[in-house]
Amino acid sequence: MHYYRYENAEVSCCYKYLMFSYNIIFWLAGSAFIAIGFWAWSEKGVLSDLTQVTRLHGFDPVWGVLLVGTVTFILGFAGCVGALRENICLLKFFCGVVGFIFFMELTAAVLAFVFQAQVKEWINDFFLVNVKAYRDDIDLQNLIDSLQKLNHCCGAEDPNDWNLNEYFNCSSSNLSREKCGVPFSCCISDPADTVLNTQCGYDVRDPKSPDWSKTIYVTGCIKALEQWLPRNIYIVAGVFIVISLLQMVGIFLARTLIGDIEKSDY
């Protein structure tokens, strides 16, 4: 009978604490995201009246923050405890979830490239739904304002998309002061202005108003995104590569640690 002896039957402290350090950052980041999400909900009064979550017809950005925070927290916790306690089940769970996330990211990128027309239509519909719910949630409002200001755009296809919103539409039954207007984030800002004019979009879509292009951005945000992506393709690709490398490093550390633990147990 032959006996085989591994040269190193101990778990590598280097990989063990590298894995712990790698994950504690994500664990803390996940905790911070969750705390920020609940703080945002408390500021909006959602925690005192949970039915507000179901009443929102648009997208609540807090849901995205909480989802990212929860996944990051769980993965960071599994990685930290799995490394310290040398728990193979937690480490395999970490590898499986990170691998699944990487696969989903890759699949989404490929599908977005292949089905560009359908993706554009979906983004357009998504944006219009949230234009309609613009005043329903302060976080959604800030998100749309940020997108319009950063991309110098207004609406999904053009400024008339704001007719979908009950405060900005031009119907005769609309008694809002913002009737036939657009949010201030659509306005072309003057570098000389030191005070933000939140009423600059009032009445700009009124048929009696002069040329819109002198006052507000007339390019839709979908078209602005299409123009932005080719100009920044290297940045987008770089971010994707960095995220992918971080995920692969995590998987490598976990798999190496699992191998050391199995050798040690054997």
Image (tube, grey):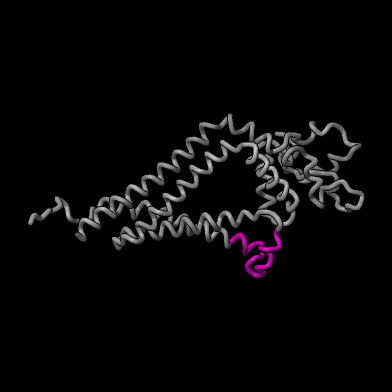
Q: Which quadrant of the figure contains the C terminus?
A: bottom left
Picture quadrant of residue 47: bottom right
Main secondary structure along the magenta-highlighted residues: helix
User: Residue 69: x percent and y percent?
Assistant: 51, 57
Instruction: Depth check: give the residue in front, 137 or 221.
Output: 221
Q: Is residue 6 left or right of residue 227?
A: left
User: Residue 37: x percent and y percent?
Assistant: 57, 59
Instruction: Depth check: give the residue in front, 86 or 69.
Output: 86
Residue drawn at the location 73% of the way across and 51% of the way down: 134
Residue drawn at the location 86% of the way across and 52% of the way down: 176
Q: Is residue 93 left or right of residue 37?
A: left
Residue drawn at the location 88% of the way across and 40% of the way down: 206
Q: Relative to 265, is 111 above or below?
A: above
Q: Relative to 137, is 221 above or below?
A: above
Q: Which residues are magenta?
A: 39-56
Q: Is residue 174 left or right of residue 76?
A: right
User: Residue 260: x percent and y percent?
Assistant: 24, 54
Residue drawn at the location 64% of the way across and 33% of the way down: 226
